[in-house]
Amino acid sequence: MDTVDEERLPVVVSAGQSLERVEVVSAVDLATRAAEAAFEGLGDLRRAIEVVSMVNILSPAPPDPASAVARRLGLSPQRAEVTTIGGNSPQWLVNRAAAAIAAGERQAVLVVGAEAQRSAKQAREAKQSRPATRPPGSSPSSSQRPAGSEPDPVIGDARSGVSAAELNAGLIAPVHVYAMFESVLAHSAGRDYETQRRALGDLMAPFTEVAAANPFAWFAESRRPEELATISPDNRLVAEPYPKRMCAVLNVDQGAAVVVTSLAAARRAGVEDRAVFCLAGAEANDVWFPSERPDPGASPGIAAAAAAALGAAGLGIDDVGSFDLYSCFPCVVQMAAAALGVAGDDSRGLTVTGGLPYFGGPGNNYTLHAIAAMTDRLRRLGGTGLVTGLGWYATKHSVGLYGSDPPEAGWRTGDTAPAQAAIDAGAVEVATEAEGPATVVAGTVVAGAGGSPAAAPVVARLTDGRHVAAAAEEDELASVAGCNLVGRHIVVSGPLPRYRLLG
């Protein structure tokens, strides 16, 4: 500690979470509640907040949500900002705040986010059942915003997560793209979809046990592996091999907030005993568009970010006592575990919240709940924890390391530049038009009404090595039901590529 300036030693000094099941609320309401919970017991430290950084909101919100939260909290920050879309954003914001504190540029930052999808749905349903009462041209958020206020500045990578190639093949819904990744993992393991579901039930059941003990979890109940894996009326097939209980649940009302300060600021406020140290962090991207990835079942981006963060902190994976791996769908858990070199049944566990299908998947903000839960855990039990967050389709990655003991050399940002250059160089060219034979690299069968196939998008490799994203001809759907098409030979045709099975 003698060699580290406490003014430049970043810590998470407090965290708060909120959950609403009854009232109709807004994301700003939930974010404010979470921030108030985080500020509890911090005394004058709330007045030291210089920046309010808010995670992108998918449910209805004003154009200045960070400023709106700041106003409700009585804060006067130098800056209020909101991110682009991406579940990597919460960890990226904490890494960014830690780096600014380490550089002597900031002393206290509030990172906050929320989703009110349940309330938004309930409000829509109520509106449909009664006459409109709001004057024409007004909006629910306009009355909450002072006249003349400006939208909050937007930070982060704003690129779209899919290209025209994926769109033309029907690959846009997250469950369809992630199910396609799962097909690669199932094929690599030599499993058909039924067997893969059973393996995924074993993987995800421990997540439900963590959720069952979490007071902020949306589904606070433990489930047996077979309850997760068995297709049934209340666990319908969504996209092979995923049933409903293996998919992130978006229809939640949840908020989270963390206060990141210097240790010196925490000490001046008399709350240094609550500090959990930000040790290191790093960011990396996988090949941006899913159809361009040489191996859709792996994430060199997670591997690069995790290796850089661990290296910067001077730690190995065996030094980490707790994990929270982003878990929107089971494939991501497997990809992250493989990238980190840990087993799916690692005794340390892979989540501290319960994961997105069981704790809840509040839009882009899940990882802020993971950071809140991780720092609370480390405050109670001590040790070191690792959190991963990702955006789009396992595209944008951010990793953070936290510890109950201060880092000897202070905060460090991991360098992923060389690894990123290698990842980007591995992108496979994608043909927008194609004619001829191809071999399926990844795919899924999307379930329609009654579970019958509604679509079967694939990414396939042409004989010249290029990839193509293609949709099944309608009269082929019955023949692909329940089938993992990875490795199957197809013939592709048309300006909007469609395919038929060969043999």
Image (tube, rainbow, N blue to C red):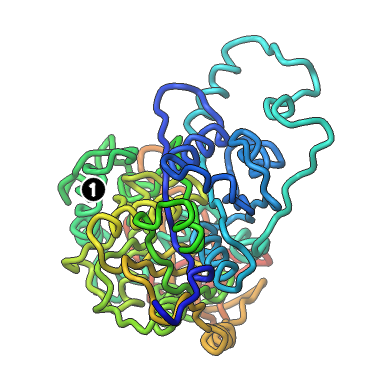
Which quadrant does the C terminus fall into? bottom left
Residue lying at 57% horizontally and 51% vertically, measured from the top left: 55
Relative to residue 223, is residue 346 depicted above or below? below
Residue 33 visible somewhere in the drawing: yes
Relative to residue 359, is residue 500 depicted above or below? below
Does 72 sit left or right of 231 as displayed?
Answer: right
Residue lying at the far right in this picture: please name it: 148
Q: Nearer the viewer, residue 113 or 22?
A: 113
Point out residue 381 in the picture as x, y percentages from the top left corner: 22, 59
Residue 2: quarter of image: bottom left
Q: How many marks?
A: 1
Residue 310: quarter of image: bottom left
Residue lying at 53% horizontally and 68% vertically, measured from the top left: 7
Q: Nearer the viewer, residue 207 or 11?
A: 11
Tag 1: amino acid: Thr
Residue 428: quarter of image: bottom right
Q: Which type of secondary structure does the marked residue at label 1 adopt?
A: helix
What residue is disc 1 on? 208
Q: Nearer the viewer, residue 368 or 205?
A: 368
Relative to residue 185, is residue 423 depicted above or below? below
Does 170 sit left or right of 343 as displayed?
Answer: right
- Circle 1 packing at 10 Å, graded few (<14), some (14-19), many (20+), is many
Residue 464 visible somewhere in the drawing: no
Q: Nearer the viewer, residue 479 or 280?
A: 280
Point out residue 273 in the picture as x, y percentages from the top left corner: 34, 56
